[in-house]
Image (tube, rainbow, N blue to C red):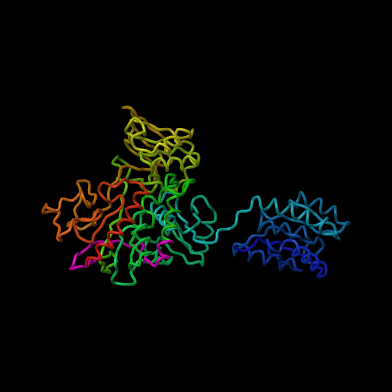
Amino acid sequence: MEKPIIFAIDDDPQVLRAVVRDLRSRYRKEYRIISTDSANEALEELVDLKNKGEEVALFLSDQKMPEMLGVEFLEKAREIFPKSRRVLLTAYSDTDAAIKAINDVQLDYYLLKPWDPPEERLYPVIDDLLGDWLSQYRPNFKGLRVIGYQFSPLSHQIKDFLSANLFPYEWIDYEANEKATEFMEANKLTAKDLPIVVKEEGEVLVAPDLNAIAESLGLHPNPDSDTYDVAIIGAGPAGLAAAVYGGSEGLKTVLIEKKAPGGQAGTSSRIENYLGFPSGLSGKDLARRAITQATRFGIEFLSPQEVSEIEIKDQYKILHLKSGVSINARSVVITTGVNYRELQAPGISDFTGAGIYYGAATTEAANCKNGDVYIVGGGNSAGQGAMYLSQFARKVHILIRKDDLSSSMSQYLIDQIDGTPNIEVMGRTQIVSAHGDGRLQELVINHDGNEEKREARALFIFIGAKPYTEWVPSMVSRDQRGFVKTGRDLNVTEPSQAWSIERDPYLLETNVPGVFAAGDVRSGAMNRVASAVGEGTMAISFVHKYLGES
């Protein structure tokens, strides 16, 4: 990040050298010192600095200059950098003009020549003004920028994708931020082109899909090899743990994820019951640590990428990817986790991504400021989401069908919710319908048998767990809810669960030898981050045993 600037102007070269010398002696570590002896040249340079996104913290200008008076220069400089502090350097005979300038151009201070010693007559003044400026200074963002409508589903998808993949970005609301209009006009773009993504080096992506963004940002969706010891499908906690142990134990490992590392746990704003983190950690932080650890051990991470089909041929599992590429794996670990079930009520689908969100959707939390938000669901994810949103919203309402949270949420979260005054738990309550004009504005709820309308800034849905197994081949046995059966849950004597080798399936092995399942996608799983990590680790030990048999 470029340092803020202290800009000095004086037409007398000898005085200017002395000013710059004293400024650099004190401030060069934190500020860049720029100087010129021409007021007109200074104004031209200020426009250039503004276009580059630079910041001027303080102007120090001489009063009597031939091109224009210092007061006039500071007035023009104020139009370009209105928040900068302004100091006039003047002789004793010009103090009346300096005092008048305090009112006319909001001059912050004037200094009399000579200012020696600077430790007494210069630095205390400049220190005070810079401290005041710093208290309000917000550096210009250097990185990705997303410009769009706040309640645009595509804008939400892009923000969610970037956030989940740990790309910092600046969100610029087209309707509320004048910087958006300035940028659009400069690039001859219209509202029909929104949303747009602007890369740090200036490349503009107009209404891009997620694959285009991923490719532009250097994500790695395609494999470097065609054969692996183990292919792990899904980068939630179980998949990440499997990848860490597969890579660390020398297996040629590929991890495939359709969106971003972390899975459903990655959307959690705060996980407080995970071993070794007494202050808790966010799901994104856990995912970041884990993917860094896994790639350090040499695993290959393909994202965004999906497996569309698994074909069994001899000792190999052929994974057909949605990109059209196929890879061969000697073993497979399915760790695709679960999705939230869709809420079935009139209007819900109309406003999904425009005020209604599945999961925590932390990218939208700031938009909930001073409004009422509603959460549907009584599990830990809903509780973590409520605690996070309570920092922004005026009131958070948790809607559950049961009387209370005791049967579905950890006690530590229940205690936190009970101690948070702007969270209300509404038992025996469900959503009837959602309404709005282009975005969610109102919910109709049924509370204890009575229907009522409620103004709503946002609705966050955390209901149930639907396993992401639609893509799993039919030969892999699943229970009635779609979760993958493993180990003792298999009855390999049934024709539908046919087992082709003499030994019994390993604990996390499916009815297809060499295909394992771990984490929330597995029938009978505990649905906790720690247990998913444990199962992912354990799956690799069974992979070793299986590979040792061939």
* Residue 482 or residue 86, whichever sits in front: 482
Report whether 388 appears left or right of 538: right
Q: Quadrant of the N terminus?
A: bottom right
Write down the region rendered in magenta: 292-319
Q: Is residue 401 magenta?
A: no
Report whether 183 appears left or right of 493: right
Q: Is residue 194 visible?
A: no
Looking at the picture, how far across and down is residue 393, in whole percent? 48, 39
Report whether 288 appears left or right of 246: right
* Residue 274 or residue 401, whichever sits in front: 274
Q: Quadrant of residue 51?
A: bottom right
From this view, report whether residue 21 is shown above or below residue 238.
below
From this view, report whether residue 211 is shown above or below residue 359.
below
Looking at the picture, how far across and down is residue 266, in whole percent? 40, 52
Q: Is residue 294 magenta?
A: yes
Q: Quadrant of the C terminus?
A: bottom left
Q: Quadrant of residue 318?
A: bottom left
Q: Is residue 205 visible?
A: yes
Looking at the picture, how far across and down is residue 283, in whole percent? 42, 51
From this view, report whether residue 227 is shown above or below residue 486.
below
